[in-house]
Amino acid sequence: MQPISSIIENKKYSFLNPKNKGFTQIPNLFLIREDISIYEKMVFIILKKYAMRKNHCWPAHITIAKEAGCGVTKVKKAITVLEGKGLITKGRDKSVRSNVYEIKYRTM
C-alpha cells in the first residue's frame, strides 16, 4: 500500500495542484435518500462535479465510469434511473457531439 504522503505529493492528486481546486457541494438530503443506489449517487456526484457553478455538463460515459469507480454499463443504468427520478435530464448537443446532462436542483 502506498503511503499517504507520497499520494499527497503526487502532482496528479496533490491538494496544492491548481487544477484540483474547488469543491462539489452535495445536499445532505440527497446523500441520505434510500431510494437511490450508491452507483446512482456516485454518478450524480460526478455530474455535479463537472457542472460546477452551471446546471449542465457533458462528460463522456467512460470518464464518469472511471471517476465513479464502476463500469460504463452501470453508468448508463444510473443515468436512466436518475432521469426517471427527475434529478437530471439528458439531451444531445451536436456542437460538442456528446450527451448533455442538466442537473435539476429543485427536485432534491
Image: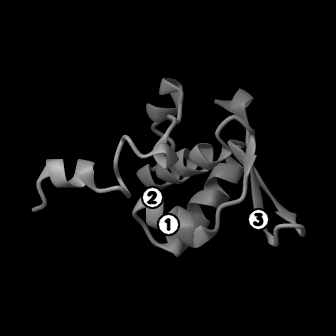
The answer to whether marks 2 and 3 mark residues whose Cβ atoms lie closer than 8 Å is no
Residue at 44%, 31% (x, y): give it: 32
Q: Is residue 40 above or below residue 26?
A: below
| Residue furthest right as drawn | 94
Q: Quick one: label 2 or label 3, which is nearer the N terminus?
A: 2
Quarter containing the N terminus: bottom left
The image quarter containing residue 16 is: top left
Q: How far apart are marks 2 and 1 (CA)?
A: 5 Å
Residue at 70%, 51% (x, y): give it: 84
Numbered tag placed on residue 68 in the rendering: 2
Q: Name the residue under label 3.
A: 99
Q: Quick one: label 1 or label 3, which is nearer the N terminus?
A: 1
**Label 3's element?**
strand
**Label 2's element?**
helix
Residue 87 in the image: state x and y as whole percent: 68, 42
The answer to whether marks 2 and 1 mark residues whose Cβ atoms lie closer than 8 Å is yes
Left or right placement of residue 107 versus residue 63 in this view: right
Q: What residue type is labelled 2?
A: Ala
Q: Which amino acid does label 1 sit on?
A: Ala
Left or right placement of residue 44 versus residue 93 in this view: left
Q: Name the residue under label 1.
A: 65
Quarter containing the C terminus: top right
